[in-house]
Amino acid sequence: MNSVDTTPDHSLVIAVDGTSGSGKSSTSRGVADRLGLRYLDTGAMFRAMTWWLLREGVDVRDAGAVAAVAGRPRIESGTDPLAPTITIDGEDVSVEIRSEEVNAAVSPVSAVPEVRARLLDLQREAIGAGGIVVEGRDIGSVVWPQAEVKVYLSADPDARAARRAAEEGGSDLASTQESLLERDRIDSGRATAPLTMAEGAVHVDSTHLTLVEVIDRIVALATEVQAEVQAGAREGA
Ligand code: DC
């Protein structure tokens, strides 16, 4: 049995931040599955908001126009690591949010403070009492700085582009890499909650590791941290 004993309140929160294509999603889902935790993909929430703005005909480069409507759509995340879902106003957009149009527009939308504030509330609500792996860009720094385990996942641009292109069914490598680097630039440079390595985060470079090796590392880390927390609780009792 792989489950971490998180009694009494199953409160473990594992924050996995990192750049696009560093393997965050597969890793986070794998870790959540192994440890019997829920899973939250915060990137999917930004993508769903972006998809909705595009469908509503809002100019996504106009921060004022985006801010004015950011409170409108209802966004819900399903947190089963084996079958995560994302709906907006009740419509499942899991497939639509991975389109090229959304890829190109999501970083500017994510830089709008009103969008971040709206989604921050939803993210904290979803984390609730914990027992969850949360992936994103600012989880360990802004959304849940008190997370017991913080991981910063990175990989070389070549490896990231190759993985993304394979995921997207063999799309062009050079343009995939260009699009990833452009998103990195905006995500790292924005004024509100930029992508950064959070204080206390463990850096895992996945360039030369298999998915299973990365998952093993994080599961080991979580098990270690949990044992420390439980020993501390016993001492304090
Ligand atoms: O992880 P992803 O590629 O699905 O994320 C899509 C975009 O969402 C990413 O370019 C930046 C934004 N994002 C963010 O700003 N903060 C998060 N916590 C998660 C994603």
Image (tube, rainbow, N blue to C red):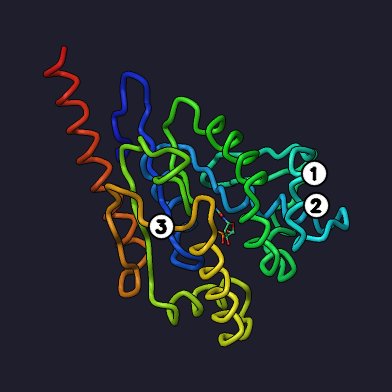
Amino acid, disc 1? Val
Give the foreground label among 2 and 1.
Answer: 2
Q: Position of residue 31 (x, y in %)?
A: 39, 48
Q: Choose the circle earlier in sequence order: 2 or 3.
A: 2
> Camera-side residue: 131 or 34?
131
- At 57% from the left and 74% from the top, the residue drawn is 182
Residue ranking furthest to the top: 237
For residue 164, above or below residue 199: below
Q: Is label 2 or label 3 in front?
A: 2
* Disc on res. 69: 1
Q: CA distance from mark 1 to mark 3?
A: 28 Å
Looking at the rendered image, the quarter that the C terminus falls into is: top left
The type of residue carrying mark 3 is: Thr
Using the numbered discs, state the Cα–Cα distance from disc 2 to disc 3 in whole angstroms: 27 Å
Helix, strand or loop for disc 3? loop
Residue bearing the label numbered 3: 196
Q: Marks 1 and 3: CB-CB under 8 Å?
A: no
Please give left or right for residue 196 compared with residue 46 in the image: left
Of residue 72 and residue 64, the one placed in the foreground of this image is 64
Is there a contact, CB below 8 Å, between mark 2 and mark 1?
Answer: yes
Residue placed most toward the observer, 185 or 212: 185
Residue 65, numbered circle = 2
Q: Earlier in the sequence, mark 1 or mark 3?
A: 1
Q: Residues within 10 Å of mark 3 (few under 14, many from 20)?
A: some
Q: Is residue 174 above or below residue 230?
A: below
**Quadrant location, the N terminus:** top left
Residue 23 picture quarter? bottom left
Instruction: Give the distance between the C-alpha atoms of the residues marked 2 and 1, in whole angstroms.
Output: 7 Å
Amino acid type at image mark 2: Ala
